[in-house]
Image (cartoon, helix red, strand yellow):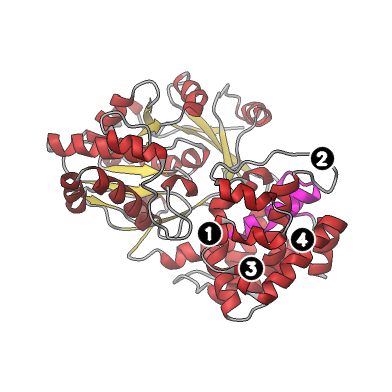
Amino acid sequence: MNVENYGYERKTVQSGILHIGVGNFHRAHQAFYNNQLLADKDQCKWGICGVCLLPSDEKVVNNLRAQNLDYTLTVCGRNGEDQIYQIGAIQELFWAVENPQAVLDKIAESAIKIITLTITEGGYNLDKITNKFILEDEKIQQDLKNPGHPTTVFGFIAQGLRQRRDLGNGSITILSCDNLQHNGNTAKNAFTTFIAAQDKDLAEWVEANVTFPNSMVDRITPATTPEDVQRLNKRSGIADLAPVYCEDFTQWVIEDNFIAGRPAWERVGVAFTNDVTAFENMKLSLLNASHLLLSYPSFLKGYRKVDDAMQDEDIVKYVRDFMNIDITPHVPAPEGQDLAEYKRTLIERFANRSVSDQISRLCFDGISKFPVYVMPNLVKMIQDSQNPVRVAFMIAAYRYYLKYQIDDQGLPYQIAEPWLSPEDKSLIASNEPTDFLGLSAFKSTNLKAAAHFVELYTQFVSDIKSKGVETVLKAIVR
């Protein structure tokens, strides 16, 4: 298959963006947009300097370095036709574990005008009830007391900005690309709280010299397994140690609030707006919430790939009813967006055989996802006396998924929940079903006080355990 090479000389490109969290989504989304834009010669100052902070990032760092930071991106078409791109937008790559000072120096560099982030929903260290930054966290306390030797993203950015200020290297924008409502406001809350607790003078400088635009990002990007690497490389004919693949749909909507300038991303399809709220609400409430809705029942039924689950008529109806009946009343369509078409496209995207996303990826870190994707609309549903049958079933399935770790087929599995608190683990272990409703993920409202919800949920808990997910789901959709 033909590979589309990038249309620029890498030696002419300068890093103007520092990105923290060089995972698959960043490389399929933001780096892809920049790769297309760098073909315009007047945009050559907007290359990306990648930064990895974690010990677990060693493999991706070594693999990308071994091939001059180039990699292939396979965009999987819903029509079965794929397009492969050679991506060269990442110009530099630092691993903080081996050289933390290089990361700090790069943040301080005058050519860097934007810091972008993909640090996951749980990475902003916010209390799930109050939405306040958790200053008491042990790693946060360590960074607050040792500004010159940071270990967290907050410590690195604070110290890097301190160096930047002291050098007189000017203003900068911090742009979150994580799936959070008002992600720019969230990032501002987290970083300014940390900085104010560490250095009041720096906090004043940040207030005047750093902006935090909100943004909405969208592109389904699975994890890449060793089998995927072989498959993708066979198609591209390139021995790529770090290939990425994704769906053909992509969207990026950004609040146009860049204090130190920005790339002309609008040339490659990025939409700029004064308010991203309607786009955020649509995407988080329909795509992300639907992903979560289908993940636990599908996994417990024995499915491991999203496209396989979407061949199951019961699961498709369950998702479609959730979008149409439960969520649409609470999602005003953004200007120029056809909501019915958006929902129809979502079903197509989930069922894309070429993407074949992992359900385990959707199940990952539910404790951080429920407060963002599900709870805001569940609260509205309860207030409006809507029937919460599908959400009650989802939460009962989530409990079973966490508690028993064995599916309907009798196959064991491991869960991945990095942000569970000791109290959460105790509530999961409890044999009293309503204790689970006190989980930190659900504390934005008192679910135990919603009598109809509790009645449905407790019945589903009992039925899933005695009859299995498949039987219970069939009764709900039919």
Amino acid carrying mark 2 in the image: Leu
Circle 2 crowding by C-alpha within 10 Å: few under 14, some 14–19, many from 20: few
C-alpha distance separating marks 1 and 3: 18 Å
Give amino acid for label 3: Met
- The picture quadrant where one finds residue 275 is bottom left
Sequence-wise first label, 3 or 4: 3
Magenta residues span: 289-311
Residue 20 quadrant: top left
The answer to which of marks 3 and 2 sits earlier in the sequence is: 3
x, y percentage for residue 284?
53, 60
Disc 4: which residue: 461
The foreground one among 304 and 4 is 304
The amino acid pointed to by label 4 is Val
Left/right of residue 446 with respect to residue 293 in the rendered view: left
Asked whether residue 310 is drawn in magenta, I would say yes
Secondary structure, mark 1, is helix
Name the amino acid, label 1.
Pro
For residue 17, say whether it is visible: no
Q: Which residue is mark 1?
A: 371
